[in-house]
Image: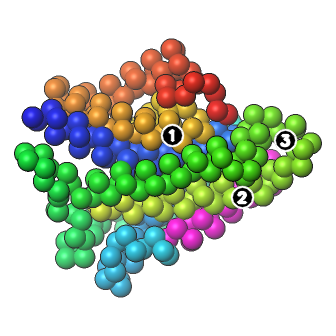
Amino acid sequence: MNAVQVALSGALIGGLYALMAAGLSVTWGVLRVINLAHFGLILAGAYLTYQLVTAWRVDPILTVVVTAPVLFVVGAALQWAYDRLSIVEFNSLLVSFGLLIIAIQVATNVWTADFRQLPVEDNPYATSALHLGRLALPTNRMLAFGFALLLLGGGHLVLRNTFLGRGMRAFAQDRMVAAAFGIDHRRLGLLLGGAAGASAAVAGMVFTLANSITPATAYEWFGTVFAVVILGGLGNLLGTLLAGVSVGVLSGLVSLIWSPATEPIALFLAIILALVLRPQGVFTRRSVA
């Protein structure tokens, strides 16, 4: 029963991993931008959620009404800057890492390096759970999984079944041909960058429901999020969701069977195997980007 509980909890928290990875996966796969500043946007979403809840005493979930539009604008502005400055894929890794460092320093200056956590009286999702017999499903993890299903599932449908989504996929596969057919890659890039920023706002909000935050928390997300991005396949939102769930289950079971210290080893072994055996992504049949 312990293994079932751990696997189920891991699958639910995998929704959070997928939310964190979605924006990075799409901008990397479609726009050819390795946007490490995305971690800074998630951090900003988490801190803005904390600030709004502590200042206005609102429900944490309602904060996305403010944070999602704000980070949509920030994400679009970042993509505009990348495009206007003609920053190529490798250079984007260096530039965006610098932007991440700046974001972390700004968070340190504003909120200090102390741990911040939503007050218990303002966060009804911190300790509540749904009980199914001997199984307990934490509310915050169910919310993470629910938001992941909604956003990534909806995003997948948009990319597959709409003119806008087909334009984005065509641009990802061949920019010159897509431009020749009248696809405005700059406008698509702004929209996609903004959507990635909005997803970061949701991920930051969900993270604060169950975790304390410090500016350095952004560094702790690197290994898990990159594992989800690589296993899911670049630009593949459905694959990202499945990869997030798989990583959550794997992490939980490895921690239970061996120890939490072996969890990073298992994750990076999974990444290595994926790169060797399925470089296009474990959960995609062909390269999306």
Which residue is labeled 3 in the image?
A: 178
Q: Residue furthest front?
A: 161
Q: Which residue in the structure is indicated by mark 1?
A: 238
Q: Is residue 274 left or right of residue 258?
A: right
Q: Are marks 3 and 2 in contact (CB under 8 Å)?
A: no
Answer few, some or many: residues within 10 Å of disc 3's Cα (few below 14, many 20 plus, some between 14 and 19). Answer: some
Extreme residue in the bottom direction: 56
Residue at position x 80%, y 54% in the image = 186
74 in magenta: yes
* Snapshot quadrant of residue 210: bottom left
Residue 192 visible? The answer is yes
Residues in magenta, as a range: 67-87
Residue name at image x 77 percent, y 39 percent: 170
User: In terms of secondary structure, where does tag 3 sit?
Assistant: helix
Measured in 3D between alpha carbons, the distance from the residue under mark 3 to the one under mark 2, in whole angstroms, is 16 Å
Above-or-below relation of 245 to 129: above
**Mark 2 surroundings: few (<14), some (14-19) or many (≥20) residues within 10 A:** many
Q: Residue at x 43, y 51 (%)?
A: 148
Q: Mark 2 highlights which residue?
A: 190
Q: Is residue 192 left or right of residue 222?
A: right
Separation of marks 2 and 1 at Cα, in angstroms: 22 Å
Question: Overall secondary structure of the magenta stretch?
Answer: helix
Residue kind at label 3, given as amino acid type: Ala
Q: Quadrant of the N terminus?
A: top left
Which mark is first along the chain, 2 or 3?
3
Q: Earlier in the sequence, mark 2 or mark 1?
A: 2
Q: Mark 2 and 1 residues: CB-CB less than 8 Å, in contact?
A: no
**What SS does tag 1 mark?**
helix
